[in-house]
Image: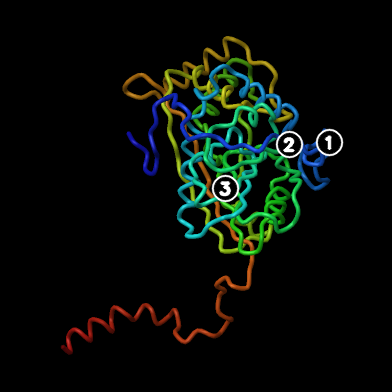
Amino acid sequence: MLRSGCLWLLRRRPPAAGVAVKNFGLRKVASGVSTPGSTSPRALNIFDRDLKRKQKNWAARQPEPMKFDYLREEVGSRIADRVYDITRNFSLALDVGCGRGYIAQHLNKETVGKFFQVDIAENALKNILEMEIPTVSVIADEEFLPFRENTFDLVVSSLSLHWVNDLPRALEQIHYVLKPDGVFIGAMFGGDTLYELRCSLQLAETEREGGFSPHVSPFTAVNDLGHLLGRAGFNTLTVDTDEIQVNYPGMFELMEDLQGMGESNCAWNRKALLHRDTMLAAAAVYREMYRNEDGSVPATYQIYYMIGWKYHDSQARPAERGSATVSFGDLGKINKLMSQEKKSQ
């Protein structure tokens, strides 16, 4: 049965599309690349960022990386739609954790004048998708953006920020590089992402090995996201959620695609090895609990979309406290007053 608010996708392999690329070159900025142990003292060191770089580089080196782009393509197009909803032109934009350029390829040069694309994986930037917007590729960590204050009119990010150790700092840096009245539009995985895979692995490992380890990385809760954006300095916030459900032949095909996306687990507390019989049991549990009528199995990707603006004097502001001329308590009387007015007529 179709979930409410979900988009069903078959496991598809879309080709890259676009027009002639105009790329101004690949730049490695030393100050923007993190070193081991260089996270903020206040941050939890949950993810092995060096391993994540290797995973993304490995995925980008595959003969046909576009085979695994279907999810990033979809989310990138939805972020581009949100950019088009804002009726203005952005002379300078930044994509944080761009991968192969999944957002920029859906935008045109009438909307964005020039695009800076930042990613931790150099192979992804070398294998960038074709687009009509002039671009500059920069190797840098999402947690250490090497740009000056008030530089960009627009910052976007798609399915990358869930791997940073210090999300509050990353959002603060995005706010820092935005110009006043600039906007940040982002998307990241939510807490219900891959719940089918998580449950199947936990049940199988508990039954076969007497306990379980985390095999799906932790995600941010949606009720925390608005607070983090506000704490970073953003205002006029919008946070909404969506679900994309993709059908796969089986659990192993899902795991193969996650590896091809560069989305393998890189948490420090991950278990290095799962026994063969545990994996087979997990696949059986997955199929038994979640299979579709056609024999395929679904995988749910929950996506959080967020929009936040950097303050500017020209922006609309709430009225001063106590300046209202109508009480909210009077709103309940509207129906009664309207019915009385109809009777009098």
Residue that badge 1 annotates: 37
| Residue 328 sits in quarter | bottom left
> What residue sits 44% from the left and 37% below the top?
244
Q: Callout 2, which amino acid?
A: Arg
| Residue 273 sits in quarter | top right
Q: Distance from label 1 to label 2 (Cα)? A: 24 Å
How dense is the environment of label 2, judged by Cα within 10 Å: few (below 14), some, or many (20 and up)? some
Q: Distance from label 3 to label 1 (Cα)? A: 26 Å
Q: Are marks 3 and 2 in contact (CB under 8 Å)?
A: no
Question: Residue 299 vs residue 55: left or right?
Answer: left
70 vs 185: above or below: above
Q: Can residue 214 be seen here?
A: no
Front disc: 3 or 2 = 2
The kind of secondary structure element at disc 3 is: strand
Towards the viewer: 84 or 339: 84
Q: Callout 1, which amino acid?
A: Gly
Front disc: 1 or 2 = 2
Q: Are marks 1 and 2 in contact (CB under 8 Å)?
A: no
Towards the viewer: 304 or 127: 127
Q: Which mark is residue 27?
A: 2
Question: Residue 40 vs residue 236: left or right?
Answer: right
| Image position, residue 145 (x, y; %) | 74, 46
Towards the viewer: 94 or 190: 94
Question: Residue 104 vs residue 243: left or right?
Answer: right
| Residue 288 sits in quarter | top left
Q: Callout 3, which amino acid?
A: Gly
Towards the viewer: 293 or 156: 156
Q: Which mark is residue 186?
A: 3
